Image: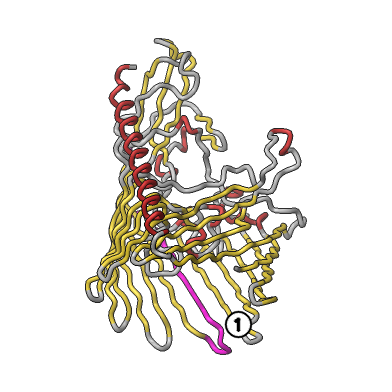
Amino acid sequence: NPKNYPFKIMTITNQGSWIYFIRILFLLICVILYKLEGHSPDLTLSGHVDYSYISRLSDRSLINIPYRMVSLDIERQADQITLNGSFALEYHVRDDSYFLGSSDPQDFIFDMRELYVTYNTNKYEFRVGKQIHSWGSVDENSPLDNASSLDYYYMFFGGIDRKMATLSASLDYYIGNLKINTVFSPLHSTNRIPLGDDDFPIRLPVYPDASEILPISESPYEGGFYSTLSTDYGDLSASYYSGYDRTFNLTGVNVYGHGGDISFPNIDVVFGYRKTDVIGIGGVLLNNWFVMRYDLGYFTTKDQNSSINRPSSFNPIYYDSLHFSYPLLEQAKYVQSTFQLETELPFDINLIAQYFTHDTISYSSDSLPVDQEINIPNLEIDPANMNPSNFFTPGMGVPLAILTKKAVFLTLEKNMLDDQMNVSITSMLDVAKYIDVSGLAGSLFELKVEYILEQDLHGVLALTNVNGTADHPDGENYAFNRMEDFSHIRFELKYFF
């Protein structure tokens, strides 16, 4: 189709520029490594090996999900230049029929999680390469922490373990007590989502084929700044980030026929990525009794696809004529906030409590005048329920917003036996209000005991229980109902080096 030529030329040009950028970055790292060789650099290696076993409480069956069995961090420094790297071996359990479809004996995936170069001065620190960024005042679940995408398989982990790195440049600049962090990436970073072929409890309602995703037509630049002002009483922060959503969204519907014949139409559901801007504020209040943390994010998101005209993604030779096209043109504004309180209770018990909320302020879109049922893998859409607002999900912000709009997180932790044993109780409570549901709709509780067997050898025993409710309006599609089968017992043996 000649109408598609400009788009194709633009796409090839953009891809060529990204490849050129990556090659320049690779050469830059090689030059820096060569320079480091001549300055007697210090090399530091650290990491751990993790042997883990996880089985369901219901029938003691093995839960088949990937996990990082080996993690390795490297740091090589000479003068003002530092090379940082983080690598992992992710283990995948093979099912009984694995070798009937593949002869590959490997059950590990090598993951170069980070590899970047840092240049330090008294005034600033510059980093370039594949790196993970952390924004926000609260420890976890910050609505401002959008500079790095999420790995859903590690959604219940803490810190950077749940994040994915992106090829980017970052600058930390210091002016007295003010720190300004800027991030820029020429690439669109998306979340790693479970595909429903293993035992991970969280699944998306629909998994489109790659051919159903409409590529971003413009240059997918992403970036922003995060500033922190330190005072005697704590920190104040302000931030701005602009990028494309980490998960796909419904962007419209096309109806195709064979030439002028539309008696047997093909309805093609098209997905894409909205452009989202986030303005955030946050703060930390310190005193002798407690620590309070708070983050608030104001999100403005808009579908950039004013036109979704394209060849059919299903049998384009037969369905060669586009008769109707209905772009959604979604626009929405929503707010997310997380409040965190840390304090020490009697008997040296540490408490960390969080309260998360998500509220959609406004939503608008065009209608979808479809008069027949749309069949999508894992999702059937009835025309009577074809309201686009029912399918709106935030593409940035706190990842747990896909589970609930309001949640409370509580962690109680105590060190015992001269700090040789750590006992913690963690809970996640769905405190949102639902029709016909009284009390909590869903909850997750974990009891974990970590014991130091030797100086570098730790043993972990954990018990996790998830509860939903049969009264929820979504029935079995309610996230905590689907997660009930994920209740499990876990044993880990970790060796640190």
Q: What colour scheme governs how the chains and residues are painted in the rendered image of this protein?
A: secondary structure
Q: Amino acid at mark 1?
A: Asn
Q: Which residues are magenta?
A: 345-365
Q: x, y percentage for residue 313?
A: 46, 25
Q: In front here: 220 or 435?
A: 220
Is residue 70 within the magenta segment? no
- Name the image quarter holding residue 224: bottom left
Chief SS of the magenta region:
strand
**Count of marks placed on residues:** 1
**Residue located farthest toward the front when viewing the structure as drawn:** 38
Q: x, y percentage for residue 31?
A: 37, 51
Q: In front here: 254 or 147?
A: 147
Is residue 3 rendered to the left or right of residue 104?
Answer: left
Residue that carries the numbered disc 1 in the rendered image: 415
Residue 158 seen anywhere in this rendered image of the structure: yes
Q: Badge 1: how crowded within 10 Å, few (<14), some, or many (20+)?
A: some
Q: Quadrant of the C terminus?
A: bottom right
Vertical arrangement, residue 396 with respect to residue 79, above or below: above
Q: Residue at x 51, y 62 (%)?
A: 73
Q: Residue at x 38, y 19 (%)?
A: 322
Vertical arrangement, residue 81 with respect to residue 478, above or below: below
Vertical arrangement, residue 434 with respect to residue 22, above or below: below
Q: x, y percentage for residue 79?
A: 35, 67
Q: In front here: 69 or 38?
A: 38
Q: x, y percentage for residue 420?
A: 64, 81
Is residue 359 within the magenta segment? yes
Residue 274 seen anywhere in this rendered image of the structure: no
Q: In front here: 328 or 199?
A: 199
Is residue 278 rendered to the left or right of residue 417?
Answer: left
Tell me the SS state at disc 1.
strand
Q: Quadrant of the N terminus?
A: top left
**Residue located farthest toward the left when viewing the structure as drawn:** 175
